[in-house]
Amino acid sequence: MPIPDFQTLMLPVLRLSETGEIRISEGVARMADEFALTTPEREELLPSGRQAKIANRVHWAVTYLVKSGLLERPRRGYFAITPKGKAVLAQPPARIDIAFLSQFDGFEQFRTKSGDGEPAAVETTGDVAAGTPEERVEASFEDLNGALRQELLERILVMHPAAFEKLIVDLMLAMGYGANGSGERLGRTSDGGIDGVINEDVLGLDIIHLQAKRYATGNAIGVEKIREFAGALDERGATKGVFVTTSHFAPAAIQYAHRSPKRLILIDGEELTRLLVRHDVAVRAYRHLVLKKVDTDYFDEAEV
């Protein structure tokens, strides 16, 4: 079954706390068991890659229950039920969610201060709107980056061929390839289909050869193009090559690259725009949002 959203977890988490103090990590494991999550579901991460999705949702279910007074945190890393929580379970509702918790003193004030007070979100059950604050932030971030990558691809498709070849060289250098920033666009008819080179050492003894092809997104790069690229590497006695396209590669082309004794790396249009954004090539930051959390080490040291 899909990973339950954090509002769906609220009632099961409250019921779990009836047994006594519960360690957060234990609560995460117990919820994963209760909802029969598979190993991949238990290990699925937030887009940031910093926390398991089920752990994040259990943490936020606990936070909301604490803010409504149904749970408390008796000590660091644990939660426990309160008398108010026990009263709720004496006549349990079918579901505990944000709408249900709104009846308790202080909860709406918490939501307003945390910037989570939009009434529409209470009734929405869609995956993004029902997600934890981190999930909503990260989903919005992914939406913005998706639009950015699409705009990048559209602009790349109308670039002059020489400018596109230079873009690929710039990207490779930004990714850390090239000794002391040593890279060059070639792109001349006499260069046998090689559009650029990256020197991995100062003397140029180890070289990565590049080929950059702009194709409309619906046109796949076939295996014959990869064979031609491999042949161009043979002529130069080269063993490393990167083939970049704005389109995508046919399955036979991907298989050929995997089987080749050379190191052939294929980068399609989707991966190209992701790399450009990740390594700040042809894009620039226009706004920084810093998310902060309590420094527990600071408070631990203060209690000594």
Image (cartoon, helix red, strand yellow):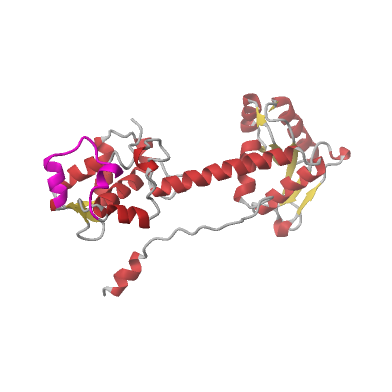
- Above or below: residue 113 compared with residue 149: below
Q: Pinpoint residue 213: horizontal percent, then vertical percent.
A: 75, 35
Total tally of numbered discs in the picture: 0
Q: Is residue 239 visible?
A: no
Compared across the picture, whether 277 is left or right of 70 comes to right
Q: Nearer the viewer, residue 186 or 202?
A: 186
| Residue 98 painted magenta | yes
Query: Which quadrant is the N terminus positioned in?
Result: top left
Q: Nearer the viewer, residue 106 or 265?
A: 106
Apparent side of residue 141 relative to residue 29 in the rendered image (left or right): right
Where does residue 66 sit, x and y in percent of width and height? 24, 53
Q: Position of residue 209 (x, y in %)?
A: 74, 43
Which range is magenta? 84-105
Residue 280 lies, in percent from the top left, at: 64, 53
Quadrant location of the C terminus? bottom left
Tell me if residue 154 can be seen. yes
Quarter of the image holding residue 296? bottom left
Along the viewing direction, whichever of 27 and 223 lies nearer the viewer: 27
Instruction: Write the residue at 14% across / 42% down.
Output: 89
Left of 161 or right of it: where is 106? left
Q: Residue at 25% of width from left, 43% of height from top?
A: 100
Q: Is residue 217 left or right of residue 191?
A: left
Q: Nearer the viewer, residue 148 or 191?
A: 148
Specify whether residue 95 is painted magenta.
Answer: yes
